[in-house]
Image: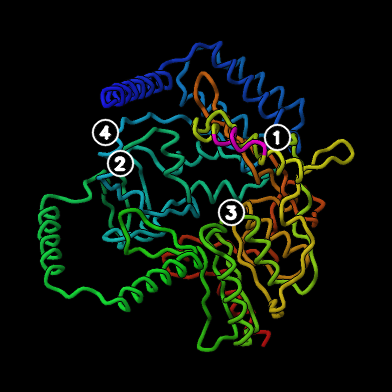
Amino acid sequence: MKKIVLTFSILLVLVSCGSIEKHNLQITKLHPVEDIHDDIDKVYKQLQRHHPRLYQYTSKETLDFKFDSLKKAINEPMDSRTFYKQLAMITKYVGQGHMSMSPPSLKLTKEERNKRLETRFDISYINLEYLNDKLFITDAVGKDSVLINAEILKIENETPQDLIATYKRLIASDGYNTTFHNRVAGNRFFGYYVNDKGRFDSISMTLRHADSTFIKRYKRRPLRDSLQVKRDSIKRDSIKLLNKTKPKLTKAEKKAKKLEGKAKRKYNSKYGFVPTPHMPEVKNYNRNLNFVGKDSTVAIIKIKGFQEGDYEDFYDDTFTILDSLKTETLIIDLRNNFGGRLNEIDYFYSYLTDENYTFLNKSEVNGRFPILKSLMSNSNPLITKVLAGILSPGLATADLLSVSKKDGQLYRRFKPAKERKSKPLNFKGKIYVLINGNSFSASSVLSTQLKGSKRAIFVGEETGGAYNGTVAGLFKIYELPNTKVKARIGLAHIDSKYKTDTDGYGVKPDVEIIPTYQDRLDNIDPELEWILKDIETKK
């Protein structure tokens, strides 16, 4: 029996190694023209089959022409990454920000993956922003925190302006919106850089900070050097010795320790704790409540993203606090919020209105089984598809119960498409909402609901997500058979009952204020300052 298990394990390793080698060869080789043309046809057929609003912003005739022109333009072999860039420049005309293309990455062996886990790449802990044609560091941890607001003049031998101009040609947005392009290119710069250049383990940047210009090189480094290993060994020995000498915990002490751990987990879930790998000291939460000034008349709810943890506890406790403190004005900060769960924004809105409401319309779909379609994507691991197959009777039933047909169009009903009552402790004071080009997806849907119901004053910049809805909710990730480029295709049109006559643009602010790089240097938040002055003026 042991011999059989050993033989099977060896075969599994050999097959895995062979599969990795085959994959890496396929994505780095030059693909024949006919294979590339085949992939172009296949991705367009997938879009036609699954995307419910494929021709909303670009007519069928125009999109047909663009795909045909791409095939004619590609008349020589090319590798997968080069093809990805060519294809992304065409699929962006679908005009849906959730629709994206991504190039394949080289696969690592198990040994290479384990080795990588023992390292840390400090470039991963830097956040960037792009304003006034300047790319600069907005947040960093550890020693790099002194570099906040440093301008990046060059990445290796290229300027960020040239790179971002290239990336903006590949970035899809909702409709004709441009604020998303400008914002996301800075915020997710290194993600686009990896798509462009491939995985890297070191990078040089020319920085300008406090009137000095210098080159900083980032590289992947071991989590622990030899001195740290020695220190950890001494620490472990000390802990062992301490554990031998210190008295055992009593039953009451064990219970108290257990309750303390439970309370910590509950707190992290409530505020949406986002762990930072290898840096447990960094405390980053998605949901935050603060007050402005010495009293509690003005509150700010900052939501970085509608995901992570138990959101109901946060909103229940937050609005109980606002009610008990008789808070008069609420500022909701949705800047750089890329979205998340529909159920969360629906729950949040129930505290922002005093009327019964229906948060979403039923969503247009192109098939009766969107959940199964999503899970059975050819890019999903085999185990996911096997489990989906086993659970298919239940999943198919869930799909059938939520999908209906009207006037020849299929619609899926998400939970927020039901009529709801507002919460008893709903906020009755004045509401301001801060938005920018990175207010996308779910945060833009929430903005539409608040704007359409005339519940809030909006300050900042047009949202990146469209006012009249977006194609998202469920996704099919389709891997092209020859080049292994992946297409992320939305399966449901998500929209509020509120609409604007001008289609293809985001939620416009009532007061437009665009921050500058100098504002960041001066540590000024001009959008928030305007709101606070407006509150003071109207007292």
Marks 2 and 3, the one that precedes in the sequence: 2
Marks 1 and 3, the one that precedes in the sequence: 1
The nearer-to-camera label among 2 and 4 is 4
Q: Is residue 210 visible?
A: no
Callout 3: helix, strand or loop? loop
Find residue 27 and report its horizontal and vertical position in percent: 43, 22
Q: Position of 403 compared to 201: left or right?
A: right
Residue 407, image quadrant: top right
Residue 388 in the magenta stretch? The answer is yes
Camera-side residue of 116 and 11: 11
The nearer-to-camera label among 2 and 3 is 3
Q: Is residue 374 visible?
A: yes
Label 2 to label 4, Cα distance in Å? 24 Å
**Residue type at the position of mark 4:** Glu
Marks 2 and 4, the one that precedes in the sequence: 4
Magenta-tinted stretch: 387-393
Residue position marked by numbered label 1 in the rendering: 51
Q: Which mark is residue 340?
A: 3
Residue position marked by numbered label 2 in the rendering: 203
Residue position marked by numbered label 4 in the rendering: 111
The crowd level at tag 4 (other Cα within 10 Å; few <14, some 14-19, many 20+) is few
Callout 4: helix, strand or loop? helix
